[in-house]
Amino acid sequence: MPTQVRIFAMPKSLGETLASTSPTSLPKPTGQATNGDTPGLKVSPYMSVAMAIPEESKDGGVTFAAQDSLPKLPIPDLESSCRRYLAALKPLQGRREHTETRLAVEDFLKSDGPDLQEKLQNYALGKSSFIEQFWYDSYLNFDNPVVLNLNPFFLLEDDPTPARNNQVTRAASLVVSALEFVRAVRREELPPDNIRGKPLCHGCQIEQDPDSKHIVVLCHGQFYWFDVLDDNSDLIMSERDVAINLQTIIDDAVQTPIQEAAKGALGILSTENRKIWSGLREVLTREERSNNADCLGIVDSALFVLCLDYTEPATAAELCQNMLCGTNEVVKGVQIGTCINRWYDKLQIIVCKNGSAGINFEHTGVDGHTVLRFASDVYTDTILRFARTINGQAPSLWKTTSPDPSKRDPESFGDVNTTPHKLEWDMIPELNVAVRFAETRLADLISQNEFECLDFSGYGKNFITSMGFSPDAFVQMAFQAAYYGLYGRVECTYEPAMTKAYLHGRTEAIRSVTTESVNFVQTFWADNPAETKVEALRKACEQHVNSTRLCAKGEGCDRHLYALFCLWQRYVDEQTSQAPSSDGFSSPTDNGSTLESVVGSPGNDSINSIDIDMSPRQRGYSTTSNPRSRDFHPVPAVFADAGWDRLNTTILSTSNCGNPSLRQFGFGPTSGDGFGIGYIIKDEGINICVSSKHRQTKRFVDALESYLLEIRRVLRITGRKAATAKQTRAREIDPAKVKTSNRLKARGRMITGLDNNAMRLRLTNGSSTGTRSPTEESLLMSDDELGGYGFFDAGMLLQALKARGDAFDHNEAKPSERAAANAKRRDVGKKLRLVEY
């Protein structure tokens, strides 16, 4: 029978999606014919992410069952937010500057503040969340490229099964597991994330088109697609079938010289500024039902994009760069790096030639915590599926699984195309020029950034908790101490706390720099006893933990004040009835890009979350845009004060992802002179990825490693007086025994380990092998080896600093309608001939 075809409809824009969702998911925008409640906001049509939650959960569905019971994010008390705002700024400002900020806050509380607070409370009455619309607007007003500015990446651990550690088998395995995840979400069989037994909000979903059945594969910058699901979201291809398709695609892609393929690599256009990319999409869709429009529809509506790279990055830093922005390699004037093998508007699974794999995703409509759950479940499923090949009784991660495709009647698959098709774009002159300029701009952007990784294996969560510290707070203080040791000052640091315990909650900003943290870094770098340093560290960590708990309850100051600022801007725009700029708001500069991500591990009771959080100036709002309207409506004092800019200019943008399925994760720097720091705290190690615009990144990482070793030495000095810090239950039983009734078990001398002095003596005299372990080396480290500056511990740094002064939706189509659409569908792309595998 002849192959039927399915018509790919162009996906809705995010604005249309927001407008069509139910009250239980996202608030319906009101006002002008623009996105949401923000006048002048225009949404690029490519920003298509389905975030709507079904109006009614399916019978027996668990994924969204708790949505209606989630409380709304509370609006903090105005005075409390202002008090926390001042507390966050105090350690970052000098005495005079802080006095000016305090006066501005007092003026705000007496004048504009109460009125804006009342407006916010009234605005929130009909909303699921008072910050939600402003949140989406902040991303959509951000005009810079998403690559290196918004999109984070995850680097997965290698597949534990050696047979899968090559490109085709690893990619096929990840695709099958990802499809099982999609199936579980669509059937509402995926258990919701929870913290201490309390369900979290699932207000955003990864997939874009609820009827999508295909994936797109990118190889050497060329586009391919094939169907992988039937109408019931069951898999129609086995892992071996997928592998055959992928090998077929690779064999076809290499037939075109990479220099030639690069000239038509349209994925590079997704790295352009939003306005430029939006205009180029109009060029692609200028003629309805044209080849280019159909090709774009296929890419936009795909479940996800699989990127097959031809490179084999050798180091962790090279791997991280490849997952975040791709490689930059120009040969004979043509870009052939993996940066051309991407589509940054979609969730991308990236697999290198050696099997190393990662995930890159556009963050606007997808919460990073959701993608972390996706990555974790996909990685877990790959392991469990391998286990079932050994023991058929091994458990499954999913409540139900797809029927074995090899045992199904092909007729039951329905209208599908399982053979890969290559998309062949019509490269008109406009597109040729656009590809060229987009590539050179991206090459500039990649060249401006550098990446370094630290796979610290000296200790991890177990040691930190045994010493009585919160792991996240402990590592946050490490960032503060390392930076202070290099530059002699503290800078604005950002870490988000997850607020998904509330309906449509996202994050709140934790301000890591506190009076206690400043006291700690100054104490640590001065000539103080070990006990004094540890006590200062303990107080700083306790304050960080308290701040994190408050933020997780929605009791921070950043989101609240930002919502007030947005309402004021809206009021001014309504009063003046004048568009502030070409798109309603001023566009930020490259240096204003922000990706302040923090990751929490699902199932690990973490209240940290991965998210891209932008400051007001970086969101596309500006206190200086539309100066004419400002003449009539002066900026409220608190937003005009220098402190507002200080707190919203992040130098250390940090993000904690506690998940063993990941090797690294990270993002670009959030400011021109800042660092982007992604870190994963594991039981016996800490993995850190640092990025910056060539700001001595390697040196900062080295300083961080030196601090981590030094603070362990200091903790061990104080720990000796407390005997063993904490013992496991298994260790506690031995000292409690007086004697044993078993004569054989009484034989032998109990090995308890050398004390530090004995260890040091043995190390000084040399070991039999002539080598030392990292632990032994760290015990021998003197203060003089810390970062190469021994005079720091003599107190000279603090004295020198003191001398400087204080300056420091979805309606499902009926079967008849679907059949009619299928009958009209035409084959898009050239059908490939399958290879033997």
Image (spheres, grey):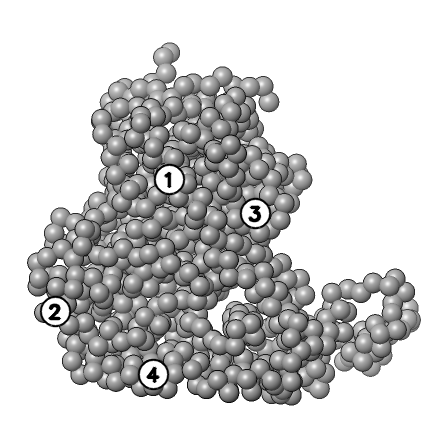
Res. 681 visible in picture? no
Front of the two marks 3 and 1:
1
Q: Quadrant of residue 348?
A: top left
Q: Say whether disc 1 or disc 2 marks the residue closer to the N-terminus.
A: 1
Residue 718 left/right relative to 227: right
Residue 424 left/right relative to 693: left
Q: Say whether disc 1 or disc 4 marks the residue closer to the N-terminus.
A: 4
Q: Say whether disc 3 or disc 4 marks the residue closer to the N-terminus.
A: 4
Front of the two marks 3 and 2:
2
Label ID, residue 98? 4
Residue ID at (42%, 24%): 422
Give the residue number, with chain letter if any, for mark 2.
631
Element on which disc 4 rests: helix
Element on which disc 3 rests: helix
The answer to whether the residue labelled 1 contacts the one labelled 4, judged by CB atoms less than 8 Å apart, is: no
Residue type at mark 4 is His
Give the residue number, with chain letter if any, for mark 1.
438
Closest to the observer, 554 or 617: 617
Give the residue number, with chain letter if any, for mark 3.
319
Front of the two marks 1 and 4:
1
Q: Say whether disc 3 or disc 2 marks the residue closer to the N-terminus.
A: 3
Residue ID at (53%, 59%): 690
The answer to whether the residue labelled 4 contacts the one labelled 2, judged by CB atoms less than 8 Å apart, is: no
